Amino acid sequence: MGPDAVAIIPGASVVNRSADTSYRFRQNSDFWYLTGFDHPGATAILSTLDGAPAYTLFVQPRDPAAEVWTGYRPGLEGATADYEADHSADCAALLEQLPGCIAGATRLYHAFGQRPDLDQKLVEIQDALRLQSRRGGHPAGQWIDPRSILHEMRLLKSEAELDLMRSAADISLEAHGEAARQIAPGRYEYEIEATLDYVFRRRGAWGAAYESIVAGGPNAAVLHYIANDQPLREGDMLLIDAGCEYRGYASDVTRTYPVGGRFRGPARELYDVVLTAQEAALQAAGPGTTLPALHDLTCRSLAQGMVDIGLLSGDVDELIQSEAHRRYYMHGTSHWLGLDVHDVGRYSDGEKARTLEPGMVFTIEPGLYIAKNDLEAPEAFRGLGVRIEDDVAVTAEGIENLTAAIPKSAEDMEAWVSEAP
């Protein structure tokens, strides 16, 4: 932050769901990363004024009557004793005390748009200081979004963070295994989703890291299908994109399963094309490469595979140049992963793609999706969708595939599903 600086980092509030019900509270990821404080209505003030770093937490005070209804609050005492704040204060007094908190700051770190009342108060304070310039008052000379620093910190995972992500991956292994054993013709997508949710919670995860995609048959060709309300049919494929959130850290896993225990005909051909592309990207990943380079490699492998099975025709270079492959592969191959499933951090330095470094975690998730009404596709491929996704941490030597233990060869997927009772 530099000297004479103050950062204001607001936490999340309870979000209304409907009428007098609310969504389960989930802390703002930036605030959670910095504080570990998992209660609503809090704000952190980080200061380098007076030449010394100081950390103040504004929190809800203890209130026995309120805690009967909504549970324990650490209060002002807990903010310092349990969360190591240097100072604590009532969150209701934040706006009143804010002028004193930022007095003398030459640099303010604040992300506009999260708390309108806080935005307005900070502007009022700065305007008042400008009017006092003749009496020695000076507003901050710089306003900086703290996420420019914070998100770069979050992008490079510590070993402790990687351990949490390994735990999330291990829970997802068990969840996908239990779900695979429930796959059978006549069952509904939501039954499989319920199995995933059950294992996530049973193993201590906060729940699903995102809305699980459980897409059978032609639903698998819908990238963000979340209705999860259709029956499974013999001979179809079932695409499951589901990961858990463990102590805030997400796993993001996709596997595609054969309903009835066997990949048949074009389904097996399509599956093998996607698996080959994913394994090629995994082989090429490591420090020094870039996500666009992995994407280009994936696209070339998929295009070649589509030509080989007759889904596309023509020269592979020309197909890629014309982007003909995007008809069936329309998304990117990778995204950052961490406290958010689509995690933070720059993807480029200016116009130059960012090189991968140890501590970065990202996904590799090629897929092919042929809509059931795509009349340009060979009829045998219509309504098929396959995606295979793993979570990859960059190491000094190469990569660690955090989700490598989750089976994905066609034979292993068939064996897993065949264990269904």
Image (spheres, rainbow, N blue to C red):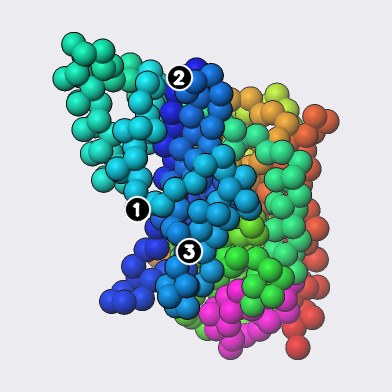
Whether residue 298 appears in this view of the structure is yes
Looking at the picture, does residue 17 appear above or below residue 344? Answer: below
- Report how far apart the C-alphas of labels 3 and 1 lie in the structure: 13 Å
Q: Disc 2 and disc 1: Cα gap in Å?
A: 26 Å
Q: Is residue 208 above or below residue 27?
A: below
State yes or no: discs 3 and 1 in contact (Cβ < 8 Å): no
Q: Amino acid at mark 1?
A: Ala
Q: Amino acid at mark 2?
A: Asp
Crowding around mark 3 (Cα neighbors within 10 Å: few <14, some 14 to 19, many 20+) is some
Which mark, by number, is residue 92? Answer: 1
Q: Which residue is mark 2?
A: 4
The image's mark for residue 366 is none
Q: What kind of residue is marked 3?
A: Arg
Q: Earlier in the sequence, mark 2 or mark 3?
A: 2
- Is-magenta flag for residue 309? no
Q: CA distance from mark 2 to mark 3?
A: 32 Å
Q: Is residue 192 magenta?
A: yes
Please tell me which residue is depicted at 58% across the width and 82% down the height of the picture: 191
Which residue occupies the extreme left position in the image?
Answer: 131
Instruction: First in sequence, mark 2 or 1: give its number.
Output: 2
**SS class, disc 1:** helix
Q: Nearer the viewer, residue 287 or 67?
A: 67
Quickly name the residue at label 3: 62
- Residue 412, image x and y in percent? 80, 66
Q: Residue at x 52, y 42 (%)?
A: 87
Magenta-highlighted residues: 177-197
